[in-house]
Structures are given as structure tokens and as C-alpha cells.
Image (cartoon, helix red, strand yellow):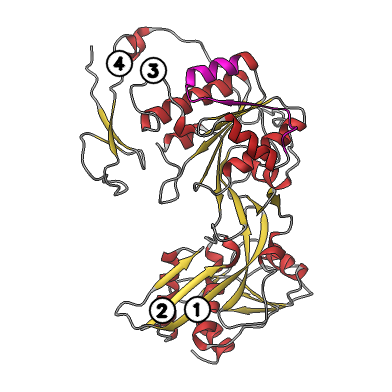
């Protein structure tokens, strides 16, 4: 019989170590490594299943046609969009987000909407008492929704209840509070989270129940617990937003039943989360008179074109190492663009503080924002305002060449719909049907700097 040995797992990233140490080598977190109970490997399973013969599985070909899974719409168009067109039966969904961002509010509104569409829905809260959830429902105007409510953390009791009730949809808020009595570890530990998620997902698949798991996130913005939890579920959603902004973004980072990177936009109001049907108009609604340091970027989020304003401020620095403050953009990408501007275009940023922000709290990560980012930086540095009806997109290479990006036609159509009449984009971009806009196709960043700011 093989002897089981204990393992040590990081609670932040899920990395497995052979021995305990104060710092995780994978993610760098301190005091995050905990010991897991050894797994029993005795019996037939330790020797190639002991010769036990299994059941032959049914095989099909790639040409086999199957009907698409049925979907149920909740009526919240933004939520249905992120799910890929509605809720799929027996699907497992993991929703993560910062504390207080509105995850519980969003899911309570969604589960109430599904219940009003005829689904039997359960909401299990492990963090709040039933009275607290009812107070939130009353504030949101959902007190009359036919949602069954429970407050429990014991996984065995929850599964027994689900087996008896046989709901269509169950929300578990949150997976870190669940406690499985067959695992000798504290609630919230890696072992408990893995076991609870496995049991709930297995129940969902075997009983045809859709389950939504709420997960906390770490300080790096990743869902806490082992990464294997994200592999267990069908869909992983992140609820994003800045505390100071009223906008919230629901982003799909994994979806087996729809497109990934799809987003839904909501606005936090006194009565809960309100859908935003036209995010571009809302993100640009607070634009005033043309000012230096502002550039409008035409981006693509999932299948939806979204126009956002990139804001930059460049000021003289009294520090030995000038500050680089970035909100809503990839800081590494910003450093690359600054290096290209300095080395290829001869525009130094040494001795200057640089502040960058995406208006509205949206996170822009696609490389197509490079040209708009460079335009905002140059506009702020030269104190020259860009035309208010100009939209910009394009990727910048390390040689300062401008590279075409995908879905240019959809970007331009969205810009034209919002009243923009001219666009700057890379040479080689294939565009059809944009006769209403004046297009300027440029080959490299040096040409862009010379045309727009008379330098380079």
C-alpha cells in the first residue's frame, strides 16, 4: 500500500509545494501556504484500478449534429449577453469581484428575474443572515419575487436541501464560506474550496441544476482559492468597477456556451443595478469642451464596439524617479509606448510625471488602444487638444510601425453613430461602408506625430 504524504498549497494562487515556506515561489504571497490533509490512495485505485472493468463509453464523430442547449432569458439584456444568450441548464457559473462591488446585488436581481420567468430558484447565503438578504430585496423592489432563501454554510445540509427541492437555479454566496465535514481543514482553505466546488458542480451536472458560485478575489484581482475551481465550472465572470464610479462591468473571461471577453455594462443606482444599453454614449456623456490630454478610442469588448475616453496628464516632476500612475490600462503597455515615443520619435518623457486614466472605470487591455494612448500622451505633453470629432485606434510595434487591428468596420460604425466624423487608423486596415467618415491611414508613429503635432 502506497503511503500518502501531506502537501502544502498556497491559498492565493493554488500552487502546490513539497514543504512549507513563508513565501510562495509562484505568486510571492507571504504566509499563504497551508498544509493539506493527505489523500488516501489505498485499495484498487493505487494499482491501475485493481483490474476492475469499467463501462464502455459511447463514441461519436466530429460530424455528429446535436441540437444547441436550450436557454432561459432572465430579461436583463446585459446579463443574458454575458452568459452567451441566456442560462443553460446544468451549467456551473463562477462570479468573482472585489468586496462591496455589487456581486450580491447583481445576482439577487438576476435570480429574481429568472424566478419571475418560471424557474424554481434558491438563494443560499453563507455570509449574511436571511433577514439581511430580505432587507436588500425590499430595497431593490424584489420582495415579491418567488425566490426561496436560505442561510447555511454546511455543504452536506445544502446538498440535502437541493436534493429535496430540485430547483432549476441555485446561487451560493459565497463558495469561500462553504464547509464540508469530510475535509479536515478550516472554511475558506484551499481544500475546503476545492471540495465544495467539486461537490456542487457534480450535483449540478447530475441533477440538471444550474449553479452560480460567488467567489472572493485576491488583492491581485484573481478569484481566491485554487485555480482548479475555474477549470471545474463552465463560465467564469468578473464583476469590475471603481468604487468612485457608478459604472460596473460584468466580463466573461471563460464561457463554454458563448463568446469569452463579452461584457455587460450596469450603472449603480439607489434602486440597484440598472442596465446600460449603449455604453459608448454613457462613457462619453461627460466629455466637455476639447481639452489637452483627451483621446477617444474605438475598442471592441467581446462582440460589442465600445468607445471610451483615454485621459492623460503630463506634468514636470520634482522626484528623482517620475511617477507613472495608470488606471484602467496595462502599465507594462504604457511603459512600452513611452519608450517607443522617446527612442523612435525623439520625444522625451524624462523628468515628467505621467498620469493615465480610462474615463468611466472601464479596463482597456487590447493592443488596439496603443495609438489612442500615444495620442493622449502627446496631446497632454504638447498642451494641444485633439479635434472633438476624432476617433483613434491602432497597434504600435516596437519599431513604431502602426499595425492594423480587427473589426475596424464595427469600430467605425459605432463612432459614426455617435457623431464622430473623422478617424485615424493604421495603413492596411480593410474598411468598407464608412463613407460618412474621413479616414486618415498612417504608416507609423513618426508620421502621426508629425501630422498631428508638427514634430518628429
Q: What's the residue at 34%, 26% (across, down)?
A: 185
Query: Contact, CB < 8 Å: mark 1 with mark 2?
Result: yes
**SS for tag 1?**
strand
Q: Relative to 66, does residue 366 appear above or below in the rendering?
A: below
Q: Quadrant of residue 284?
A: bottom right
Query: Contact, CB < 8 Å: mark 3 with mark 4?
Result: no
**Earlier-in-chain disc, 3 versus 4:** 4
Residue 23 image point, x, y percent? 24, 45
Q: Which mark is residue 353?
A: 2
Q: CA distance from mark 3 to mark 2?
A: 55 Å
Q: Let me know if residue 197 is in the magenta part.
A: no
Q: Nearer the viewer, residue 241 or 133?
A: 133
Q: What's the residue at 47%, 77% (across, down)?
A: 400
Q: Is residue 456 visible?
A: yes
| Residue underneath mark 1 | 313
| Residue underneath mark 3 | 182
Amino acid at each position: 500500500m502506497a503511503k500518502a504524504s501531506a502537501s502544502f498549497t498556497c491559498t492565493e494562487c493554488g500552487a502546490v509545494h513539497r514543504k512549507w515556506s513563508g513565501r510562495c515561489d509562484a505568486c510571492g504571497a507571504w504566509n499563504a501556504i497551508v498544509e493539506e490533509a493527505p489523500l488516501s490512495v489505498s485499495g484498487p485505485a493505487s494499482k491501475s484500478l485493481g483490474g476492475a472493468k469499467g463501462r464502455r463509453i459511447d463514441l461519436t464523430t466530429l460530424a455528429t449534429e446535436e441540437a444547441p442547449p436550450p436557454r432561459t432569458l432572465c430579461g436583463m439584456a446585459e446579463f443574458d449577453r454575458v452568459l452567451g444568450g441566456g442560462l443553460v441548464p446544468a451549467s456551473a457559473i463562477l462570479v468573482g469581484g472585489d468586496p462591496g462591488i455589487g456581486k450580491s446585488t447583481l445576482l439577487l436581481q438576476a435570480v429574481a428575474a429568472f424566478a419571475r420567468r418560471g424557474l424554481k430558484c434558491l438563494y443560499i447565503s453563507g455570509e449574511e443572515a436571511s433577514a439581511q438578504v430580505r432587507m436588500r430585496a425590499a430595497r431593490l423592489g424584489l420582495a415579491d419575487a418567488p425566490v426561496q432563501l436560505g442561510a447555511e454554510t454546511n455543504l452536506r445540509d445544502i446538498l440535502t436541501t437541493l436534493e429535496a427541492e430540485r430547483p432549476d437555479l441555485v446561487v451560493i454566496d459565497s463558495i469561500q464560506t462553504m464547509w464540508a465535514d469530510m475535509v479536515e481543514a478550516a472554511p475558506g482553505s484551499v481544500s475546503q474550496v476545492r471540495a465544495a466546488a467539486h461537490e456542487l458542480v457534480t450535483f449540478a451536472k447530475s441533477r440538471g441544476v444550474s449553479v452560480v458560485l460567488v467567489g472572493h478575489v485576491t488583492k491581485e484581482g484573481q478569484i481566491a482559492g485554487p485555480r482548479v475551481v475555474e477549470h471545474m465550472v463552465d463560465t467564469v465572470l468578473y464583476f469590475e468597477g471603481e468604487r468612485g464610479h457608478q459604472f460596473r462591468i460584468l466580463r466573461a473571461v471563460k464561457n463554454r456556451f458563448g463568446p469569452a471577453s463579452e461584457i455587460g455594462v450596469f450603472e449603480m443606482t439607489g434602486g440597484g443595478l440598472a442596465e446600460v444599453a449603449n455604453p459608448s454614449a454613457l462613457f462619453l456623456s461627460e466629455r466637455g469642451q476639447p481639452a489637452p490630454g483627451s483621446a477617444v478610442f474605438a475598442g471592441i469588448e467581446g462582440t460589442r464596439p465600445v468607445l471610451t475616453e483615454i485621459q492623460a496628464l503630463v506634468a514636470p516632476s520634482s522626484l528623482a524617479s517620475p511617477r507613472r500612475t495608470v488606471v484602467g490600462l496595462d502599465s507594462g503597455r504604457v511603459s512600452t509606448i513611452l519608450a517607443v515615443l522617446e527612442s523612435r520619435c525623439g520625444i522625451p518623457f524624462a523628468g515628467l510625471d505621467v498620469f493615465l486614466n480610462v474615463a468611466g472605470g472601464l479596463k482597456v487591455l487590447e493592443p488596439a488602444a496603443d495609438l489612442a494612448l500615444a495620442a493622449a500622451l502627446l496631446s497632454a505633453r504638447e498642451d494641444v487638444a485633439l479635434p472633438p470629432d476624432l476617433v483613434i485606434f491602432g497597434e504600435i510595434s516596437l519599431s513604431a510601425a502602426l499595425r492594423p487591428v480587427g473589426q475596424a468596420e464595427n469600430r467605425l460604425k459605432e463612432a459614426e453613430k455617435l457623431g464622430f466624423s473623422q478617424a485615424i487608423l493604421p495603413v492596411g486596415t480593410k474598411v468598407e461602408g464608412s463613407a460618412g467618415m474621413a479616414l486618415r491611414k498612417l504608416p507609423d508613429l513618426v508620421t502621426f506625430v508629425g501630422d498631428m503635432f508638427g514634430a518628429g
